[in-house]
Image: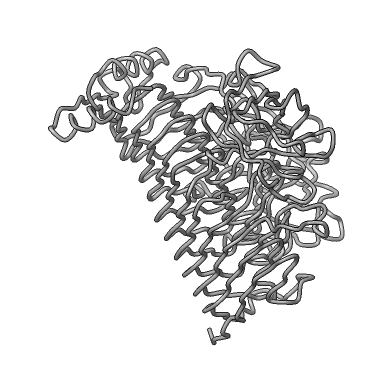
Amino acid sequence: MKTTLTLLVLAALATTGRAATFAAADYGIVPGKTFKAADVTRLLGDIRKSAEPATLVFAPGVYDIGPDQCQERTWYISNHDQWNPKRVFLPLEGMEALTVKATGAFLNLRGRIIPVGIWDSAGVTIEGFTVDYETPPLAQADFVAVDAKAKTVTFRLLPEAKPVLEGTRLVFTGPDFKGSSGGGILFEADGRLAYRSADTGFNLNQVTKNADGSYTAANCANRAFKPGQRMALRNWGRPAPGFVLSDSRDVALADITIHYADGMGVIGQNTENITLNRVRVVPNRDKGRYFSTQADATHFSGCSGRIRCEASEFVGMMDDAINVHGTYLRLQKRVDDRTLECAYMHGQSFGMEWGAKGEQGTFIRSRTMERIAGSDNVLESVVALDKPTVRAGAKRLRLTFRDPLPAAIDPAKEKLGIENLTRTPAVTFIGNRVANNRARGALFSTPKPVRCLNNLFDHTDGSAILLCGDCNGWYETGACTDVLIAGNVFVNALTSTYQFTEAVISICPEIPDLARQKTRLHSNIRIENNTFVAFDAPLVFAKSVNGLTIRGNRLVKSTSYPPYHRNREWLTLRGCENVKAEPPLEVRP
């Protein structure tokens, strides 16, 4: 990328009105017309040649995007299936000071395609795209009849589905996929997730097609099933996210709508300063859908600077609305006093740049999640061990440090992890709506300030907010040290339980040996002036926190669902210190 001085020069040029404008239509990229990947390559090449800030304009209309319109890239993307090569419509690589204006432009994806990828770029703003799949790999079954005695369900599929019966097994097909499902997420007719259904099995191995075009599945009826419900039939794959922001800085997305992505809607990794404004990840109700993305609406791994998400809407996802974390590497070998061999441990997280010279690492004991005192050190180098480079898909890395490592940093003695403290962002999540989604609402795992303010969490199926930290399974960092959760409204969260869903707000790090922990993981967390509309008891669960303040909150008791949670207390504490907690003021609805 260009130097900071170059960026300042480009910014000065922008203020004097010197800028280049490129129209996609001038390169044959026109709604309703056939174009080739070479046309996109030529367009992006001309933009890179420009010495001025550039604006790229897409005309309103529907762009049909299939393999012939895409580039192929070998990209390793955090928390996704590492299938390569990937198909990308708009790979914005090595861009400086670029604005893409696409108001009214609808990208109709015909296959597992990444619509936009921003790599090794700075000062990129994307405005106005709407993105959807013509045939999503995630199918929706609308229940017509349920016979509990016969254990059969009769259902219709949305017109977009391309089902095939292979004997009695129902299989879904598309331009570049073929597969079935063993279950999914159950929606009520009003779009809410069905009470206490969580991840529900659905047998597609004994299916017959009826004369009216519907299907009947045998040995399938769950006690919760009833006519009028919809089930999003998942395949659990995450091969193709929507917008990818990687190894870049100063990236903004505004007025974006994502109806479906075969993975996360927006994924940022190793990127400094990200802004999301009026980003909508929502079902395409014009097509009858109740689901949106296959996984999280937004997800940020190893980022730095600040992440700001404002005035956005996240509905019907198969996972969280936002997840912010880093990645623990597991120590495998102490080579010498300054050198360690480490590894990525999760199967969907490797091949990304973990760190660079001059960045700060710190070490943590996996069983107690305690930071090792005096272990902070500065990286001198990061070298891939099992691939030519880290980005080529390396899982094993050699880290060399500036200063000698304490004797305690030895994986032969105990299980240890390392966190990159430099690649941790401050987060502002403000004025957003999260509704009718699976698992959890917002997840924050960063030591920098977190502000979760004035959001509406409307029927998140699990916890509305989770602060975690895990160096044992997901290997997602880490300690939160400055969190303010204020002014939010939580409406009937926790209709089902998933991992870490102990209360509406769940501070639940994965600590195998909490009894031996001496130093708490999280600190300085304030939960203030929120409104809980709750049908069940648990509002806050906190584990391993030093400094927790809960005050000024209100409780409105709901009768929408019967209570069921095993936790019968509004507040539960495990291994916490310096807690100041006021019960919420109960008010009438």
Outermost residue, left direction? Answer: 16
Is 231 placed above or below 100 here?
Answer: below
Q: Residue at x 73, y 75 (%)?
A: 563
Observer-nearest of 562 and 16: 16
- Is 326 or 586 nearer to us in this picture? 326
Residue 34 percent across, percent down from the top left: 38, 19
Q: Is residue 461 above or below residue 213?
A: below
The x, y position of residue 45, in whole percent, is: 34, 15
User: Residue at the spot x=67%, y=24% of the render?
Assistant: 397
Q: Give the vertical position of 2 relative to 445 (above or below).
A: above
Q: Is residue 425 left or right of residue 185?
A: left
Query: Residue 355: image x %, image y %?
Result: 57, 30
Q: How many marks?
A: 0
Q: Residue at x 53, y 54 (%)?
A: 315
State the quadrant of the N terminus: top left
Q: Would residue 504 be visible to someone looking at this image?
A: yes
Residue 82 location in percent, x, y?
65, 26
Is the residue 326 above or below the residue 248 in the image? below
338 left or right of 30 in image? right
Question: Viewed as shown, does residue 396 lie left or right of 310?
Answer: right
Between residues 420 and 568, which one lies in front from this camera angle? 420
The residue shown at (84%, 37%) is 413
Can residue 290 be seen in this snapshot? Answer: no
Q: How is the image coloured?
A: one colour
